[in-house]
Every structure is written in structure tokens, then in C-alpha cells.
Amino acid sequence: MTSDATRVARLRALDTCAVSDALDALGLVGAALGLHSVTGRHHVAGRAVTLELVEAGTVTAPRHLGTAAVDASGPDDVIVVAHAGRPHVSGWGGVLSAGARRRGIEAIVVDGAVRDVDEATALGLPVFAVTGVPVTARSRVVERDWNIDVEIAGIAVRPGDYVVADGSGVVFVPAGSIDAVLDKAELVVAKERAMVERVDQGIPMVDVMGADYEILLTTTQKDTSR
């Protein structure tokens, strides 16, 4: 049986583009558009630990936002914050980043703004978000709950789903589809690698990216000759 750690390692070896292509081929949607790294160049993968933020005053917050998720997470975990795309108020900050780095958490993904970006960058903590902003969450947004189903940039994300993020963006993979997505993405990578080798050989691009490129996802099959 394939372990979660093995799946995360395989996912980490892939880029978001290959994973997005695999999702396309399987009729799934997972690219969370509008999110990007705000702390430099990173390539990360892991399992989602979710939390949702809402406007202050709509619920009684049991704790400061994100703290329970940080305390419960560690290596190979990605904290995923449903912040409703808010660009005007932070959904993550520096003290939380320090706690996340201390716990060895893989990365933070926030569907909205974050602050203390320089602190997270100095810590080496990958943070993906809509934007950076100095405005505090205090008295503006609170945590409704954590370890729940959430929506990130229009993508449904459940606790334990898989996340991969790099310079092209953030992609989520449903846990129940991870094996099929990994298999398909690895085949896409292999085929594109062969195409690049042909480019390096000086073969004209019109031949390298011929008619079959447009049907790459439907024609990619396992090599059964081995």
C-alpha cells in the first residue's frame, strides 16, 4: 500500500503545471487562480490542514485564528486558510509564521491577504496568498472553525487533500484522486521531457510540438514494454 509520505514525495517531484494537466485529463478542477508566493521562490507539496475566517462579530471566536491548526500540524502539512479572497485585511501574520516554522510546517496558503511578509521570508516559510497587506486581522476577521471543508479561490478543499505550489501558482488534488493524478502527471512529465530532448537535438518546433501535442493528455499512456 502506498503511504501518504510517498504520495507527498511524488507530488513534490512534480510542478503545478503537470498536476493541473493531469487534473484536466481526469475531468477535475484544482488550480486556485490568483494565489502566488509572496515570500520568494518556493516549490512545496503536502496535505491540507484547513481553517475558515469570517467577519468579526458573526461568530464567537474560541481562539486566535490559526493557532489550533498550527499546534496540530507539522512536516508535510500545508495550512490552508479560507479568507474569502479579502485583499484589505490580513488572514495570517508573523507570530503564526514563527509558530509554523517551529513546527516544521511545509507552507501556508491563504485565499486573501497576509501580513508580516518580510518576517515569513526571513524565516524561510513559504507563504502563498493573494497579496501582502499591513492591516491586522484583529477586530476584523476571526476563525470560524478549522479542520473543515472550505473553498479556496473557488476550489473545494477538504482536510487531508493534497496541495502543490510553485512559481506558477497553487493546485489542490482531492485525496481520493491522488493516485490517478500522480500517475497521469508523471506520464505527462515524461512525455514533455522527451519533447525537450528533441528540442535540444535541434528538431524544428513545428515537429516537436506536432498535431499530437494538442491531444497530449488523452494519448499519454503507460509504457507497458518494461
Image (cartoon, grey):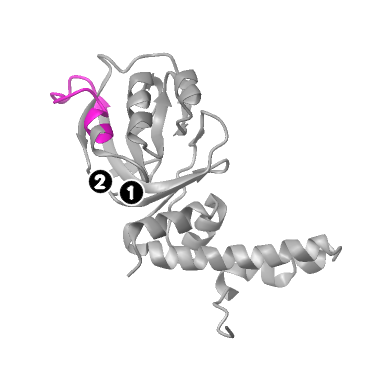
Residue 66 among those drawn in magenta: yes
Foreground residue, 162 or 151? Answer: 162
Crowd class of label 1 (few under 14; some 14 to 19; many from 20; radius 10 Å) = some
**Residue type pointed to by label 2:** Asp
Residue 56 among those drawn in magenta: yes
Q: Position of residue 173 (x, y in %)?
A: 40, 55
- Kindly give the residue lying farthest to the bottom in the view shown: 225
Classify 77 as above or below 53. below
Q: Main secondary structure of the magenta part?
A: loop
Residue sitting at x 25%, y 26%: 65
**Residue type pointed to by label 1:** Ala
Q: Position of residue 3 (x, y in %)?
A: 34, 62
Which region shows up in magenta? 54-70
Foreground residue, 63 or 20? Answer: 63
The secondary structure type at the circle numbered 2 is: loop
Crowd class of label 2 (few under 14; some 14 to 19; many from 20; radius 10 Å) = some
Q: Which residue is mark 2?
A: 149
Label 1 to label 2, Cα distance in Å? 7 Å
Residue sitting at x 62%, y 70%: 215
Left or right: where does residue 135 sit relative to residue 226? Answer: left
Q: Earlier in the sequence, mark 1 or mark 2?
A: 2
Residue sitting at x 34%, y 20%: 95
Q: Which residue is mark 1?
A: 156
Q: Give the position of the C terminus as an image quadrant.
A: bottom right
Task: Please report contact status of discs 1 and 2: CB closer than 8 Å, yes or no.
Answer: yes
The secondary structure type at the circle numbered 1 is: strand
How many labels sit on residues?
2
Left or right: where does residue 85 sit relative to residue 118? Answer: left
Foreground residue, 9 or 152? Answer: 9
Q: Which mark is residue 83?
A: none
Residue sitting at x 40%, y 36%: 109
